[in-house]
Image (spheres, helix red, strand yellow):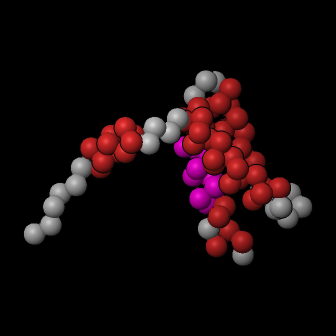
Amino acid sequence: MGNVISLEAYRASRALRDPVTAVDRLDLAVSRLDPLVRHSPDRIQAGVERELRRIAHELSAGRPAEAAERAERLADRLEHPVAHV
Protein backbone atom coordinates (compact mmCIF):
# COMPACT_ATOMS: atom_id res chain seq x y z
CA MET A 1 0.00 0.00 0.00
CA GLY A 2 1.04 3.58 -0.56
CA ASN A 3 1.52 6.35 1.93
CA VAL A 4 -1.03 9.07 2.51
CA ILE A 5 0.52 12.48 2.01
CA SER A 6 -0.94 15.55 3.63
CA LEU A 7 -0.72 18.45 1.21
CA GLU A 8 -1.29 20.86 4.07
CA ALA A 9 1.72 19.48 5.97
CA TYR A 10 3.81 19.51 2.80
CA ARG A 11 2.96 23.14 2.07
CA ALA A 12 3.68 24.16 5.66
CA SER A 13 7.09 22.48 5.63
CA ARG A 14 7.87 24.00 2.24
CA ALA A 15 6.89 27.45 3.48
CA LEU A 16 9.40 27.10 6.32
CA ARG A 17 12.19 26.11 3.92
CA ASP A 18 11.37 28.59 1.16
CA PRO A 19 9.38 31.54 2.44
CA VAL A 20 7.95 33.13 -0.70
CA THR A 21 5.74 36.11 -0.09
CA ALA A 22 2.60 36.90 -2.03
CA VAL A 23 4.39 39.89 -3.55
CA ASP A 24 7.20 37.60 -4.76
CA ARG A 25 4.63 35.29 -6.32
CA LEU A 26 2.86 38.23 -7.94
CA ASP A 27 6.13 39.60 -9.30
CA LEU A 28 6.98 36.22 -10.84
CA ALA A 29 3.50 35.83 -12.35
CA VAL A 30 3.61 39.35 -13.81
CA SER A 31 7.01 38.63 -15.35
CA ARG A 32 5.39 35.59 -17.03
CA LEU A 33 2.35 37.60 -18.14
CA ASP A 34 4.19 40.61 -19.53
CA PRO A 35 5.56 39.01 -22.72
CA LEU A 36 2.35 37.04 -23.25
CA VAL A 37 0.21 40.17 -23.19
CA ARG A 38 2.75 42.49 -24.84
CA HIS A 39 3.18 40.24 -27.89
CA SER A 40 -0.46 39.26 -28.26
CA PRO A 41 -2.12 39.88 -31.61
CA ASP A 42 -3.51 43.39 -32.12
CA ARG A 43 -5.76 43.49 -29.08
CA ILE A 44 -5.99 41.16 -26.12
CA GLN A 45 -9.19 39.25 -25.59
CA ALA A 46 -11.87 40.83 -23.44
CA GLY A 47 -11.63 37.99 -20.89
CA VAL A 48 -7.89 38.50 -20.47
CA GLU A 49 -8.32 42.26 -20.14
CA ARG A 50 -11.05 41.74 -17.53
CA GLU A 51 -8.80 39.38 -15.55
CA LEU A 52 -5.92 41.89 -15.66
CA ARG A 53 -8.27 44.51 -14.22
CA ARG A 54 -9.31 42.11 -11.45
CA ILE A 55 -5.65 41.50 -10.62
CA ALA A 56 -5.05 45.25 -10.41
CA HIS A 57 -8.16 45.65 -8.24
CA GLU A 58 -7.03 42.92 -5.81
CA LEU A 59 -3.63 44.56 -5.52
CA SER A 60 -5.02 48.07 -5.00
CA ALA A 61 -7.39 46.66 -2.37
CA GLY A 62 -4.39 45.37 -0.40
CA ARG A 63 -4.84 41.71 -1.27
CA PRO A 64 -1.54 40.67 -2.91
CA ALA A 65 -2.11 36.95 -2.26
CA GLU A 66 -5.38 37.02 -4.21
CA ALA A 67 -3.76 39.11 -6.96
CA ALA A 68 -0.88 36.63 -7.18
CA GLU A 69 -3.26 33.68 -7.38
CA ARG A 70 -5.25 35.31 -10.20
CA ALA A 71 -2.07 36.29 -12.06
CA GLU A 72 -0.65 32.76 -11.76
CA ARG A 73 -3.86 31.23 -13.11
CA LEU A 74 -3.97 33.69 -16.00
CA ALA A 75 -0.31 33.05 -16.87
CA ASP A 76 -0.93 29.29 -16.78
CA ARG A 77 -3.90 29.74 -19.08
CA LEU A 78 -2.06 31.97 -21.55
CA GLU A 79 1.04 29.75 -21.61
CA HIS A 80 -1.03 26.70 -22.51
CA PRO A 81 -0.43 25.59 -26.13
CA VAL A 82 -4.13 25.82 -26.94
CA ALA A 83 -4.04 29.55 -26.17
CA HIS A 84 -1.78 30.10 -29.18
CA VAL A 85 -4.05 28.50 -31.78
Percent x, y for residue 1?
10, 69
Taking depth in this image into account, of 26 and 19 the one nearest to the observer is: 19
Is 63 situated left or right of 16 in this image? right
Q: Is residue 44 above or below residue 30?
A: below
Let me know if residue 51 appears in the view. Answer: no
Q: Position of residue 12 (x, y in %)?
A: 33, 40
Magenta-highlighted stretch: main secondary structure?
A: helix
Q: Is residue 17 magenta?
A: no
Q: Position of residue 32 (x, y in %)?
A: 68, 54
Residue 63, can we see it? yes
Give yes or no for residue 71 being in the magenta stretch. yes
Q: Is residue 66 left or right of residue 1?
A: right
Q: Is residue 46 left or right of residue 20?
A: right
Residue in front for this viewpoint, 78 or 2: 2
Magenta span of residues: 69-77
Hey, which quadrant is residue 61 in on the image? top right
If the image is split into quadrants, where does the C terminus sit? bottom right
